Image (cartoon, rainbow, N blue to C red):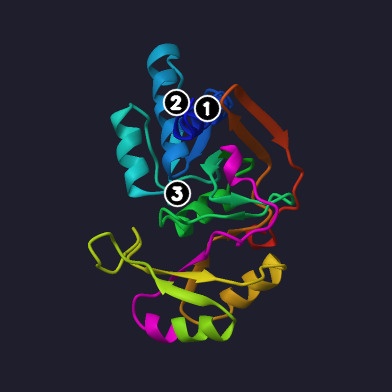
Amino acid sequence: MSVTLEADVAKAHAARSAAGLVEPGMIVGLGSGSTAALMVKRLGERVAEEGLEFVGVPTSVSTAELAREVGIPLRDVDDVPSVDLNIDGADEIDPQYRMIKGRGGALLREKLVACIAKRRVTIVSPEKVVSRLGAEMPVPVEVSRLGHRHVEQRLKKLGATTTLRRTPEGMIFVTDGGNVIIDCGFPALADPETLEAGLKAVVGVFETGLFLGLCDVLVIGRPEGAEQIVTRARRWTGCA
C-alpha cells in the first residue's frame, strides 16, 4: 500500500470512529479540513441509513456546503446555547494534546465552536502527532485586513518569521470572516501558552492557530483501524 493510500485509509478510519460518537438529539460542531470532510460525509450516511437526527454547527463555509449536500440540518453558532460534541482535525498535536490548526484558514470559527463545546474530539492520522509543535508547521495568526502590515511587524518583534498567506493565484487569502492570515514560524516553540498570550496581546490579532486545552478525546486513525484516547487535557481558560 502506498504512503498516500495509507494516509487516506487512516483518515477514513479516524473520521468513521469519531462520527460514531454522535448520538440522536445532539448539537455537533462540524470541523473543517480533509479529515473533517470525511467525518461529515460519514454523518450524512448515518442520517440516510439510520435516520440519525442531530443538528450541525459548521466551522466554515465549505463545511456548511458539504453538510447540506449530505442532508445534515445546520444552525449558526450564535443560534445555539452550546455544542454537545465538536469534531475537528488538527495540523499538529503534541504529547500534551496541544495543537496547531488553521492550515485551511478557518481557525477563528473553529476555536469559537470548540470553546462552547462540552466535549471536543480531535481526529488525525499518525503523521499529525509530533513531539514538539512548530518544528515543521508555522502558527497561523488571523488578523485584521486593515493594518495587517503593521500587525506583521509586531509579530516579527515577537521572534516570528512571517508570511502573509496568499491563494494559489497569488492573491491575498481572505478568511470566511473577511480577515487575513499571517503564518508565523518560530525557531523554538517551547512554551505554546506564553506564545499564545503574547500573540493575542498584539492589537489587530483576532485569533491564533494554537489550540491549547481543547482536546478531550484524540482519535488516531491508522490503516488497520482507529484508536480513541481520552486525554483529560487541562481545559483552555479562554473558554471560561
Instruction: Check disc 3 and report its element: helix, strand or loop.
Output: helix
Work out whether 111 lies above or below 141: above
According to the image, label 2 marks what residue?
A: 43
In percent of width and height, residue 85 lies at: 57, 37
Q: Is residue 146 magenta?
A: yes
Q: Residues within 10 Å of mark 2 (few under 14, many from 20)?
A: many
**Residue positioned 46% across, 31% down in the render:** 8
Evaluate if marks 2 and 1 touch, with contact meaning CB atoms under 8 Å apart: yes
According to the image, label 3 marks what residue?
A: 77
Work out whether 149 lies above or below 85: below
- The amino acid type, in three-letter code, at marker 3 is Val
Q: Which mark is residue 141?
A: none
Instruction: Check disc 1 and report its element: helix, strand or loop.
Output: helix
**Residue positioned 72% across, 67% down in the render:** 190
Q: Which mark is residue 19?
A: 1
Sequence-wise first label, 1 or 3: 1
Sequence-wise first label, 2 or 1: 1
**Residue positioned 70% across, 72% down in the render:** 194
